[in-house]
Every structure is written in C-alpha cells, then in structure tokens.
Amino acid sequence: MKKIEVKLSLPVVAPLLDVIKSTVDDLRGSLAAPSSGRDLDEDLREVWVDSLLVSQSGDCRTLLGLFDRDFFSTGVISFDETNAEPIVRACAAVRLRLREKYLKRLEDESLESGNIELETLPEPERKAFMCYLFLATIQELIIQHLDSSIIES
Amino acid sequence: MIVGQAKTTTAPSARAETELALQGLWHVVVLNDPVNLMSYVVMIFKKIFGFDEPTARRHMLEVHEQGRSVVWTGLREKAEAYVYSLQEWHLNAVLEPDEKN
C-alpha cells in the first residue's frame, strides 16, 4: 500500500488546528456547497442533503483524526489509500467554509492566484488564510502522490 | 364535488407533463468556484466520468474560463447520480434540461 508521511512544523500548524476544528464544527448540519440539491423536488432534496451531510461529516472526522496524540508528539501525518479520498474532500469542504466565513472580503482572482500579502491581513482573516493554504497543500500532496489510488477506488 | 372532479381531470395531465420532462435529456453542468484547486477538479472529472487527462483538463479549463462546462448529457436518473457524486466532492454542479430534445 502506498503511503506518504509528512513531517509538519508543530509551532506553525498547531495554532491553525483551532480554526480548522471550529470550521468543522460550523459545518455540522450545513453543507459546504449550500446550493446542493436545489434543482430537486422537496422530498428528494431532503434525503439528498442528509446523505451529503453524513458523507461530509465522516470526511471531516477523518481529517481531524490526522491530528491525534501521535501528531502532537512527532509532528507527522500520514496518508494512504484508505484516508486519502475523505481527507482531500474534507479539505475542500473546510476551504469552502473558510472562504464563506472569513475570506469573503478577498477577491476571487486574488484567492485563485494566492497572490495575497499575508502580513496585510488582519486577524482572524490571516489565520484563516493560512489554514486555507495549508489545506490546499495537503490536497496537492495527496493528488500528486495518491491520485491513481483515488481515481481507481 | 365539482372541485373534486376538476382535480381528477387535471392531475394526470400535469403528471404526464412532468414525466415527459423527466424523460428527456439532461445536462450535468459544473459551475466555477474560486476555491477548489484545478488539480482537484481534474482528478474528480477523471474519477467520476472516467475522462482521460486531456478531456478532464479541457472541461476544468472551460469551467475556469467560461464559468461552466457541460460534463455529461443523458437520462435524468443517471444525471442525478453524477450531480450527487460531484456535490459529494463539493463541486458546484447542477442539472439542466437539454432544450434541443
């Protein structure tokens, strides 16, 4: 089984985890992409949204599971074929909610290019943007190394 | 009674119209969002639709540059399943009727 281990800087990443956790809490009961199921009839929409919520919630649990006691002692997180897919999805959900909750003021173009001076951002935007970049980096790592495992699963 | 009779005559016709609409062809359309990474979108297109890399990239760029891309067209039930899968990956995907059919 293909596995990636990444050693992170604890002093840099640990302060971001509170923001990630609170964003995951915020996602409880609401979808990251709220328009989901909008073109369906009412009954089907309810089942549809509930099912997406279960999936989103499971993915977020897997993401938070990366930052367990081992992580706080070693700074290492690992990805393999079993957790790559839920983690990459959870990163997308949390990034969408971070954008909605903290980064709305930033222009789409700046956000897409990542061309934003971190020092110029006030708190809590600054920390939220760091989380946003950190989660994108996790996604890139997984896609670069485990793309085929996800596509074939 | 009269109201009841009127209902029994109009309801089947309305149902038939809905059924006809559902029987036509439907587009699965992915809309742009400024958050999801290009590589992520390409990966999802490859996984869900079985696209090769150039096709997945072409659709991703269409979404990025034109704001939308029709990624699949076919019967409603399968189109719904594709939209569900795309939304599970947090892409902004919608169903649209194919007006030509």
Image: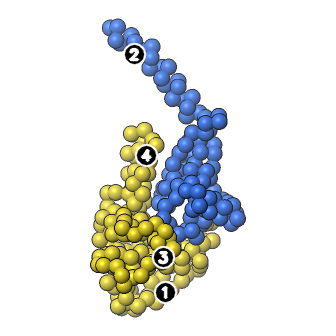
Chain colours: A yellow, B blue
Q: Position of residue B48 (x, y in %)?
A: 60, 58
Marks 2 and 1 sit apart, C-alpha to C-alpha, by: 66 Å
Per the image, label 4 sits on a secondary structure element best described as loop
Most foreground residue, B87 or A95: A95
Quadrant housing residue A93:
bottom left
Q: Give whichever of discs 1 and 3 has the lower sequence position.
A: 1
Parent chain of label 2 = B
| B64 sits left or right of A83 in the view | right
Q: Which one is closest to the eye, mark 1 or mark 4?
A: 4
Give yes or no for contact between labels 2 and 4 (Cβ–Cβ under 8 Å).
no
Quadrant housing residue B30:
bottom right
Parent chain of label 4 = A
| Amino acid beneath label 1 | Val
Give yes or no for contact between labels 3 and 2 (Cβ–Cβ under 8 Å).
no
- The residue under label 2 is B7
- The 10 Å Cα crowd at callout 1, few under 14, some 14 to 19, many 20 or more, is few
Which of the labelled discs sits on residue A114, or is there none?
Answer: 3
Looking at the rendering, in which quadrant would you find the C terminus of chain A?
bottom right
| Amino acid beneath label 2 | Lys
Per the image, label 3 sits on a secondary structure element best described as loop
Q: Give whichever of discs 3 and 4 has the lower sequence position.
A: 4
Which of the labelled discs sits on residue A38, or is there none?
Answer: 4
